Amino acid sequence: MLTANASWLALSLLTGLCLGSVMNMVVYRLAATILRDEDDPAPALNFFWPPSHCPHCGSAIRWYDNIPVFSWLVLRGRCRDCGAPIGWRYLWLELSLGAWGLLCAWLLPPGLDWGAFMLFGAWLLALAWIDALHRLLPDLLTQSLLWLGLLWHLVSDRVALEDAVIGAAAGYLTLGLLYWLGRWRYGFEVLGRGDMKCLAALGAWLGWQALPPVLLLASLFTLAFALWHIVRRRAHRRSEFPFGPGLALAGLVFLCYPLLH
Ligand SMILES: [Zn+2]
């Protein structure tokens, strides 16, 4: 099952780095659109306009400054025009999707399943990132991820389509039930509505059988993250933590799990 040669690994790594660059733009523009103040006189962004620019000085980013990872390292994380820091977070998504590309090439030969794995990683890592930064799991990403999963199972036999459809519904209902119980019992939202849609998407990709272990692992990841922050005194016991990154990591683990046997 594990088939990889150097050129396939390199091609998949490059694809991952480029996907990371695209998803960086998606995360930035999607968050800016959703969080935009209605009264803001500046024109709203969309995915195609304006062209990539420095958020600090507004100067357009040249094509040779837009090469994933490489440009960031050459410019040492600063804008070529004004010297404002670009921030390591742009590097993070590119590097993590590059690593995901390597893993996918190690697990799979070129083909449809590899493409599906790459898209799943791109969507989930972008969701994890946008949730960690802004406490948002945008519908545009969670809903499209769900449909991509169902469409994949139409043409691939990795998960039965029935299991995927039941997984989507069960994922939504499980966290939906928790959400409403929490509101009824404690009077506040114990988790976000985006979390239900994200688990529904994971159910569509992994099948309903994967939902209990995914939820367990996602909770463990979130708990570990929370404890780490509390130990480092960056948070206290009543702080809120996003669940999206834990769900995303658990989803990635369980997508690869059947291939590791
Ligand atoms: Zn600048």
Image (cartoon, helix red, strand yellow):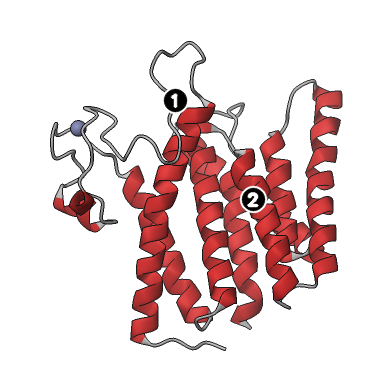
Please tell me which residue lies in front, 174 or 201.
201
10 Å crowding of disc 2: few (<14), some (14-19), many (20+): few
**Which disc is residue 44 wearing?**
1
Amino acid, disc 1: Ala
**Mark 2–mark 1 distance (CA, rounded to whole Å):** 22 Å
Residue at x-position 78% and y-position 43%: 175
The reply, left or right, for residue 187 in relation to residue 94 is right
Q: Quadrant of the N terminus?
A: bottom right
Residue located farthest toward the front when viewing the structure as drawn: 49
Q: Secondary structure at mark 1?
A: loop
120 lies above or below 188: below
The reply, left or right, for residue 121 in relation to residue 155 is left
Q: Position of residue 196 (x, y in %)?
A: 73, 43
Q: Quadrant of residue 55?
A: top left
Q: Quadrant of the C terminus?
A: bottom right
Determine contact: label 2, label 1, CB under 8 Å.
Answer: no
199 lies above or below 115: above
| Residue 220 appears in the picture as rendered | no
Q: Position of residue 206 (x, y in %)?
A: 71, 65
Q: Which residue is mark 2?
A: 144
| Residue 215 appears in the picture as rendered | yes
Amino acid, disc 2: Ser
Q: Position of residue 10 (x, y in %)?
A: 34, 76
Please tell me which residue lies in front, 122 or 156.
156
Please tell me which residue lies in front, 37 or 99.
37
Q: Position of residue 251 (x, y in %)?
A: 63, 59
Residue at x-position 73% and y-position 69%: 153
